[in-house]
Structures are given as C-alpha cells and as structure tokens.
Image (cartoon, rainbow, N blue to C red):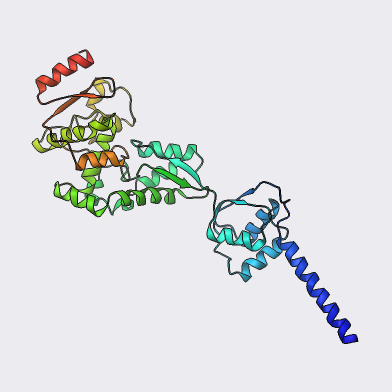
Amino acid sequence: MRLVIRLIALGLLLVFCFAAVIHLSSCPLPVDSPPVTVVIEPGASSRDIADALHQAGVIRSPFLFRLASKVLKADGKMQAGEFNFEPGLFVWDAISALVEGKVVHYPITIREGLRVEDIAALIEEKGFGKKGRFLELAKNPELVAAFAEPEELADTLYPVEGYLFPDTYNVSKGMSEEQLIAMMLARFSQVFTEEVKDKASQMGLTVHQVSTLAALVEKEAMVPEERPVIAAVFLNRIRIGMKLGACPTVLYALGRSGGTLLLKELDIDSPYNTYMYPGLPPGPISNFGKSSLEAVLNPADVDYLYFVSKNDGTHAFSRTLEEHNRNIALYQGN
C-alpha cells in the first residue's frame, strides 16, 4: 500500500514539475496581445538575450531560457537583429527563431543613378548604418577585385562606385555596413553574368569599362529609348579618340549628383573631367541599372557624335559640330 502511495506521489510530483516547466517555458503575454519587438545587439550573450526577452515580457524565466539554450546547443548561435515574438510561444520557439535569424526585414530601394555618397546618406537616414563607415568601406578596392583590376581602380574616388546594383533590398536592423555592401555587390554579380562578360570582351571592353559607360548612360539618358543612342555616341567618340565631354562626369568631380554646371566649373582639374581628359573617367560616376548596361552592350547603329538636351527629357542628336551648334542655338538659346 505504501508503495502505491509513493508511486502516486511521485507521479503527482512529476506532473507538477512538468506543468511548472511548461508554465515557466511559456510566454506570459495575453494571447490577444500584439507581437513584441526585441532588438538583440551584436555580440550579445545568452544571458544578455535572456534578460532582454524577460524585460520585454516575452519569457517568464531567464534561467530556464539559458538552460534550454545549453540543452539545445544554441549558445553562440543566436543571431543579432530585430525580432518579432508572438504571444503563445515557448522558450524553445524563441531560441529557434534567434538561431535561424528570423529577423524583421524592411525594404530599402536603391534607385538607378545614385552615387555611393547618396546611398550612404540614404542608409543612415533610414537607420540601417552610418554614412561615414559606409564610405570608408567603399574606398576598399579589394571589395570589387572580382570585377576590376587594381590598376583600373587606382584613381577612383570610391572603387565600389558602379557596383552597388540598384534594387529593392530587404534589410534588417543590426546588419553591418559590410553586409549591406556585400548584398549589393552580390546582386551586381547576378546581373553581370559570364554571358555579359563575354559580350563585353567581344566589344573589346573590360567589366570596369562597360560599367563606367553604363553609369554615364544612366546619368545622361532621361527616356528609355535614348539609352542605346547615347551609348552609341560615347562609343563612337571613344573609337575615334574624341573627348567624351560629359557634364555628369564634371558634376561627379565636384561632388554633386546633378544641377546646373557653370562654364567656369569645366576647368576643374580632375581625372573625372571628360572635357579636360580624353577617354573614360577613372570609373563609374553612378550606380546604373540593367537597362543602361544593356544599352552599352547593344548600342544603336548610328554615327552620331553629339547630343544636346531639348529641355523636355529628350535630346537632339547630330553627326557634325556644325549640326550640334545649330541644335544648341535652337534648344539652349545661345
């Protein structure tokens, strides 16, 4: 009889302990509560994470969280970032989400034609990094060693300029500036395929030269149908050794994305000044989109050497300087 009583008592104790563990492992939030957002800082220990979740009301027992993380061998594997935790989860659910890195993602759009400095400012404005750190990293030529030779990058302001491919990216808080740049460079690799590299090679151009031309087209073209024509103008000028004379390259040398270029500013002594120096500038002056890349690889079959803005987003193209001067007088009033 005593044995039966002991077994019953032991059973009740086990049930009580099991119920207690389940209770302590459960989320204390009411089931109808909204998700709770918790930011886990980089380098946080399991103790730090347990305390953060406990303070946010996601878990009942920091001790049980730390014990579970050891049992599940999750110590050192839980990731940093911003996480949303739903009411009704258990400790092991939270640990699983942290290990798998189920962070909250936010879309950030990098538009075609933005410079590295514009992208850095946008990232800081959106709260995903520091502009200064981003620009510091952008000066590292090793980041684009897969796309350009060291000598091609020697005179560039930012070696990664042109290789941060415009797109909408899903980013998370806690991502480093290194990770953000790596994400954009990886997207560039997806677009600049081996087939594209072969086409560039057939044209006698390197990846860096194609990228530099595509960035010029991106800054000059306002309407899609003119991109191949503008690309043809630049390629025609290069072929005969004529200076490119592209205003956006001077603006880039001046540290500006756009605006009116004054006549006196054409005298700036910079390798990016294509009015002063022949050939391509040292590198891209913007981060171009796929349509500008395709325009360079498939230029229009025209022999134009000049173009001037009509002030409506389109351009007037011409073959001779005489025609060009007439167009300038017609559309620019001088």
Q: Residue at x 24, y 54 (%)?
A: 194
Q: Nearer the viewer, residue 269 or 220?
A: 220
Q: Nearer the viewer, residue 283 or 210?
A: 210
- Quadrant in which the N terminus is drawn: bottom right
- Placement of 317 over or under 102, stated as above or below: above
Q: Quadrant of residue 76?
A: bottom right
Would residue 76 be found to the left or right of residue 218 on screen? right
- Placement of 255 over or under 204, stated as above or below: above
Q: Is residue 282 visible?
A: no
Q: Residue at x 33, y 32 (%)?
A: 255
Would residue 308 be found to the left or right of residue 188 on screen? left
- Placement of 314 over or under 114, stated as above or below: above
Would residue 113 be found to the left or right of residue 21 on screen? left
- Quadrant in which the C terminus is drawn: top left
The x, y position of residue 86, in whole percent, is 64, 52
Would residue 200 be found to the left or right of residue 159 on screen? left
The x, y position of residue 225, in whole percent, is 24, 32
The x, y position of residue 173, in whole percent, is 53, 47
The x, y position of residue 201, in whole percent, is 16, 50
Q: Residue furthest top?
A: 333
Q: Residue at x 21, y 40 (%)?
A: 296
Q: Is residue 287 visible?
A: yes
Q: How many marks?
A: 0
Q: Nearer the viewer, residue 271 or 297?
A: 297
